[in-house]
């Protein structure tokens, strides 16, 4: 049974329960701090059939702390503080709910709102901690999982939201001086604020993605797959520019402004969420490329990637072979354990021999004994590399490592698991040109969205509902 969703649901349940308890703890009292504007005399005017003044306490700053108690139910009431001339010094407009709790119709607060905000801050930090814990647990179990990308990406998003919420909370002062609408507005505009602050970084990032793709196409040729980073860069640029342009169109009727702000803040929050998931893809791509497999391997699978016209390995394929050979020798030195190579790759239409045979010939020139080399020469893609190599091994009780280039490592691990290899299967990547990386990150991001379509759709719908609700609260 997967306990991870249960942990997250339990955390949300505790948060909602705490909000309910905080609401119930509000009772039928309300504290109103009135500004006397340096007047010595005052009078409090209100509907005494609905509320009563429980106590009045002068404060050192010259203001007045007025404690009110509800009598009526499900009604609105005004409380005015007047000077001796009958002029209004301060006022509040209150709604009394069916259970007698006050709601301030001017600020949007209620007696225990300060503690509800604190509960929200604590909840977000706890959620971030749980997500980071799940990320660490996932990479301990198996690094080649889209779960790892999702956990670290979602952690980044929630952690930034928690920090922003904490700053908004601290900026609101004490319970007496609290302005809940200011807090709501700050949290509500989190995505918008971040998009403005991060625009210079995103602009440089977008240009970097486009430039890297141009270099990739120049060296590797044109294909749709080789344009993914450029498309991502254009999306970032166009998205940021449209967001700023849309933000400037803030005129119209009250209803139009409300709809405008709901769309603006909702889209920018969703955009930020997806950006964090993409950052998670980058983090995992870099992380797996720096992990060295344990020196306990029985089989070393080298993944093919094209050969020269004369049948020799291309520089890219030679790099994979060298990486496997280096690991082979290091394992013998470290643990004394011998390993068998599996050269995996079929013969393309313009290739004189299979990629597997090309790799075998290269390994022989590097001093690897022929009896330590097995051939898998039928595969045409990474999934078949893994599936057919697993069939050759035909033993569940062995340890396997695969070798590819660094930018291709995470995706290869995903295919290894889908082909039925054990979760402890490890991989190692050979060094590669810088311009391969951005495109690889975008591919993993798209792969995650594709594998978790339902989860991402639920998250987007949740954010739409949340921002629609906040819009009606704020307006």
Image: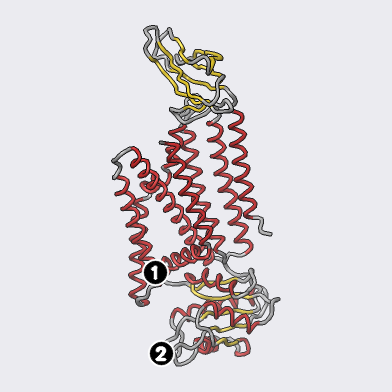
Q: Is the residue 176 above or below the residue 134 in the image?
A: above
Front residue of 300 and 203? 203
The percent position of residue 446, horizontal first and vertical second, equals: 46, 65
**Secondary structure of residue under mark 2:** loop
Residue under the image location 34 percent in, 41 percent down: 257
Q: Is residue 262 left or right of residue 246?
A: right
The percent position of residue 311, horizontal first and vertical second, equals: 45, 90
Front residue of 428 and 80? 80
The percent position of residue 425, horizontal first and vertical second, equals: 62, 71
Query: Crowdedness of circle 2 by 10 Å Cα count: few (<14), some, many (20+)?
Result: few
Quadrant, the C terminus? top left
Spatial CA distance of label 2 from label 1 is 24 Å
Query: Crowdedness of circle 1 by 10 Å Cα count: few (<14), some, many (20+)?
Result: many
Q: Identify residue for label 1.
A: 435
Front residue of 44 and 200? 44
Task: Using the rendered view, name the quadrant where residue 184 is placed.
Answer: top left
**Secondary structure of residue under mark 1:** helix
Q: Identify residue for label 2.
A: 309
């Amino acid at each position: 049974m997967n306990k991870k969703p249960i942990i997250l649901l339990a955390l949300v349940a505790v948060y909602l329960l705490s909000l309910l308890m905080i609401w119930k703890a509000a009772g039928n009292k309300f504290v109103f701090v009135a500004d006397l504007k340096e007047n010595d005399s005052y009078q409090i005017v209100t509907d005494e059939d609905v509320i009563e003044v429980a106590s009045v306490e002068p404060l050192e700053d010259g203001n007045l702390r007025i404690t009110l108690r509800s009598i009526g139910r499900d009604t609105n009431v005004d409380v005015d503080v007047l000077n001796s001339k009958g002029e209004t010094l301060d006022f509040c407009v209150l709604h009394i709910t069916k259970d007698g709790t006050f709601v301030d119709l001017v600020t949007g607060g209620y007696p225990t709102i300060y503690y509800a905000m604190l509960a929200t801050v604590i909840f977000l930090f706890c959620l971030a901690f749980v997500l980071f814990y799940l990320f660490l647990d996932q990479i301990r179990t198996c690094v080649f999982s889209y779960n790892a990308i999702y956990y670290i990406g979602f952690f980044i998003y929630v952690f930034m939201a928690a920090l922003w919420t904490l700053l908004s909370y601290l900026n609101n002062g004490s319970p007496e001086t609290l302005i809940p609408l200011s807090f709501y507005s700050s949290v509500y505009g989190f995505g918008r604020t971040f998009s403005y602050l991060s625009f210079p970084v995103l602009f440089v990032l977008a240009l970097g993605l486009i430039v890297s793709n141009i270099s990739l196409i120049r060296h590797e040729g044109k294909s749709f797959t080789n344009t993914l980073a450029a498309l991502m860069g254009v999306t970032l640029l166009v998205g940021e520019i449209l967001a700023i342009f849309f933000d400037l169109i803030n005129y119209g009727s009250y209803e139009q402004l409300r709809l405008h702000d709901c769309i603006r803040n909702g889209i920018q929050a969703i955009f930020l969420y997806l950006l964090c998931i993409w950052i998670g893809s980058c983090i995992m791509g870099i992380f797996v490329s720096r992990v060295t497999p344990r020196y306990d391997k029985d089989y070393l699978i080298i993944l093919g990637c094209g050969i020269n016209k004369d049948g020799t390995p291309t520089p890219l394929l030679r790099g994979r072979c060298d990486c496997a050979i280096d690991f082979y020798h290091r394992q013998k030195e470290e643990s004394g354990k011998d390993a068998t190579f599996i050269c995996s790759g079929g013969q393309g239409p313009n290739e004189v021999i299979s990629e597997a045979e090309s790799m075998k010939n290269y390994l022989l020139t590097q001093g690897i004994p022929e009896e330590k080399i097995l051939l898998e020469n039928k595969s045409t893609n990474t999934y078949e590399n893994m599936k057919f190599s697993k069939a050759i091994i035909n033993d569940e009780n062995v340890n396997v490592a695969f070798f590819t280039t660094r930018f291709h490592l995470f995706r290869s691990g995903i295919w290894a698991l889908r082909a039925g290899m054990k979760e402890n299967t490890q991989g190692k990547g050979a060094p590669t040109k810088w311009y391969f990386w951005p495109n690889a990150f975008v591919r993993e991001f798209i792969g995650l969205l594709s594998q978790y379509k339902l989860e991402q759709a639920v998250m987007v719908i949740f954010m739409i509902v949340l921002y629609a609700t906040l819009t009606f609260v704020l307006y």
